[in-house]
Amino acid sequence: MAEAEKKPKRSEKMYGKGPKISDEPAGKKPDAGGGVREGGAPKPKVAAVEGEGRMTEGGNAGGDVMAGTDGIPTMHQESTERMETHHRHERERGDMMHRHEREHMQREMGHHHEKHAEMNKRHEEERRSMNTRHEREHKELGERHAGMAEEGPTGGMTEKDEGKAGTEK
């Protein structure tokens, strides 16, 4: 039998050459040490930062030296403190709820000495005192931040009247 005439592959018809098959996948080419990617653009340098995103290391800047507000807490610091307090309160509330649930389960299984009514009364008192304390802490936090805000961005400095000038005559 005579060999059938070979049809040209689609890529040969379109581009005049066949596909190039390499051993390495397209995105996995080893770096030759030149620091340049295949397209000619330099590789971006990635700095390793320890503790990134944590506000505990190095302290907070607290204002701008050039603006004359150095040492005055900024809004993001106050908001961080509010959020940390809120999350602490929520964790504490969740822990108390789970502890109360465990105590009820233990009582049902006969492993707790309290009667149902006594336990409910104690749990209610604990919940109320915790909520009262959380409200007091939240109020104190708000008052402290409001005290800082009364000074405003000027830090309590007053503006000196320079008189009328320009178009204000």
Image (cartoon, rainbow, N blue to C red):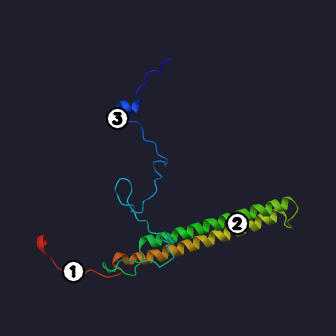
Q: Is residue 27 left or right of residue 68?
A: right
Q: Earlier in the sequence, mark 2 or mark 3?
A: 3
Amino acid found under the numbered disc labelled 3? Tyr
Q: Can residue 99 be seen in this view?
A: yes
Q: Nearer the viewer, mark 2 or mark 3?
A: 3
Near mark 1 (Cα within 10 A), the count class, few <14, some 14-19 or many ≥20, is few
Residue pointed to by mark 3: 15
* The C terminus: image quadrant: bottom left
Q: In which quarter of the image is residue 40?
A: bottom left
Residue located 34% across and 57% down the image:
41
Amino acid found under the numbered disc labelled 1? Asp
Q: Is mark 3 on a helix, strand or loop?
A: helix
The percent position of residue 143, horizontal first and vertical second, equals 49, 75
105 vs 129, nearest the viewer: 105
Residue located 36% across and 30% down the image:
13
41 vs 105, nearest the viewer: 41
Residue pushed farthest top? 1
Q: Is residue 111 left or right of residue 126?
A: right
**In whole angstroms, how far apart are the C-alphas of marks 2 and 3?**
71 Å
Near mark 2 (Cα within 10 A), the count class, few <14, some 14-19 or many ≥20, is some
Amino acid found under the numbered disc labelled 2? Met
Using the image, determine if residue 55 lies above or below residue 28. below
Residue pointed to by mark 1: 161
**In whole angstroms, how far apart are the C-alphas of marks 1 and 3?**
77 Å
Answer whether labels 1 and 2 touch (C-beta < 8 Å): no
Q: Nearer the viewer, mark 1 or mark 3?
A: 3
- Residue 96, which numbered label? 2
Q: Which of marks 1 and 2 is nearer the N terminus?
A: 2
Using the image, determine if residue 29 lies above or below residue 125. above
Q: What element carries label 2?
A: helix
Residue located 75% across and 64% down the image:
100
